[in-house]
Amino acid sequence: MRRNDEMKLGVMVLQGGSHESAWRDPRVPANGGIDIDYFAHLAALAEGAAFHFIFRPDSPSVVDQDHATIARVNRNDGFEPITLLSALSSRTQHIGLVATATTTYHQPYHLARMFASLDYLSQGRAAWNIVTSGYKFEAANFGENELPDHDTRYARAKEFVEVVKGLWDTWEDDAFIRDKQSGVFADTTKLHLLNHRGDYLSVRGPLNIARPPQGYPVLVQAGASDAGTTFAAELAEVVFTATPSLEEGKRFYATLKEKARALGRDDDQMLIMPGIVPIVGRTKQEASEKLERLHSYTHIDVLTGVADRWLGFVTDLRSIDLDSLVPETLPQTNLFQSRQKLLLDLAVRQKFTWRQLIRFISDSKGHLMVVGTPDEIANVMVDTFDQRAADGFNVLPATFPDDFKDFVELVVPELRRRGKFRSRYVGQTLRENLGLKRPFNRFTLATVSSRP
């Protein structure tokens, strides 16, 4: 199993931080979600520390159900990811740019153009976080009453990604000769129509932009249900997941790597990068006080509303005795099935009351959370990496910019001291920096394969 000794690191950039009440911290800009200078500062911090990428999550909807929750969260005031990262491409030089876009309510031709454009704007640093819509309020924004069922969303997603990849392969890498003397701009013998007709999509092509610098922008995926892991094993190059314990991380890592291996994929061509929420303090007490301060900002309407959402809107926590134990089962959701199962399984194992579970969800969303000194956080990260529960991490600082700055200044040097994280960029593109191969053009490959 090939793997070098250095972990990969990304950071999820959010309006105020990963904690639900981060925006109330006096040090956090309240209008950060719509401030390009704020995001440019975060990108500069990450790039200065040689992070592999910044990661921008998204949903094309307001995701909360009740006005009581909507009134107290800041997530409904932020830039669309491809727009934001296109702007940041001109204010960064090396760091990868991961934008989230749903296959449920986009059209593949549009996304193929936008991500190819972002790859050119950034000179080969784009990545697509492929999601199927998981919030029930998205459907009504696109003329539907309900989301398609879970498996249908993944079936469409698989076809969608294959269509987008086919569109990126429209032009061979050297098709645009741009010869002023002859007057020939493009060699049309190197132009290929997709002519796709499938179960969900019909797309002719060709795409009206050259093949992206990376061949394809890096393909990132975050599902952990049975359908999600099958999708990841087939298509994903970076997998973002939630594994709140070492043992769970090792199981997920081994299972997904084996699935990919069975499909003929190399282990080092699919990187598993779970989320980690590091609460860093120069002492353990200082770290704990940081978390307690965030707790003091969090209203009960936020706690219950956010927990209801991550559990798939199958509960009404405002009418439940919060000091009662979480039951072993809940009705299955059509939304985030894997996250609902992860949270419920953890609550049962830990014998959580509802109050404890909703606090846990507010703090970590089910990700690995470490509250401690730089040495303690580095220990957990290195142990998780060395025991093959991760190829790296997507870092979710509780607040921006201060908690992220503390991670960069205090934890990253510890990782480097142990030989587990790089000190500079080594490649020109995101693929090169992640150790991922540039994909062949399917049409060129088919032509070569058909030769005697």
Image (spheres, helix red, strand yellow):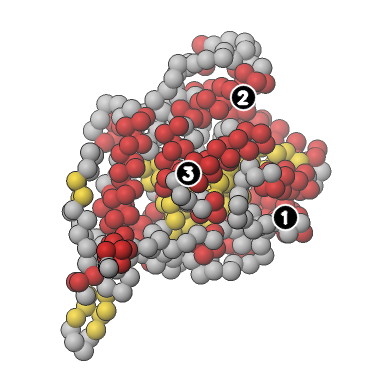
Q: Residues within 10 Å of mark 2 (few under 14, many from 20)?
A: some
* Residue at mark 1 to residue at mark 3: CA–CA distance: 33 Å
- Please tell me which residue is depicted at 31% across the width and 63% down the height of the picture: 449
Residue 73 vs residue 262, the one in the foreground: 262
Q: Which mark is residue 262?
A: 3
- The outermost residue toward the front is 452
What amino acid type should be assigned to the residue bearing mark 1?
Leu
Give the mark nearer the N terminus: 1 vs 3: 3
User: Can I make out residue 134 in this image?
Assistant: yes
Secondary structure under tag 1 reads helix
All told, the count of numbered labels is: 3
Q: Is residue 79 visible?
A: no
Q: Position of residue 260 (x, y in %)?
A: 48, 45
Q: Residue at x 67, y 65 (%)?
A: 423
Q: Quadrant of residue 251?
A: top right
The residue that label 2 is drawn on is: 346
Compared to 418, does 131 lie above or below? above
Left or right: residue 413 versus residue 444 is right
| Residue 5 relative to residue 337: left or right | right
Image coords of residue 205 (percent x, y) = 20, 57
| Neighbourhood count class around disc 1 (C-alpha, 10 Å): few under 14, some 14–19, many 20 upward | many
Residue 146 numbered tag: none
Give the percent coordinates (x, y) of residue 7. Answer: 64, 54
Residue that appears at 54% across and 59% down: 434
Mark 2 / mark 1, whichever is N-terminal:
2
Q: Which residue is mark 1?
A: 415
Is label 3 in a helix, a strand or a loop?
helix
Where is 350 relative to 384, above or below? above
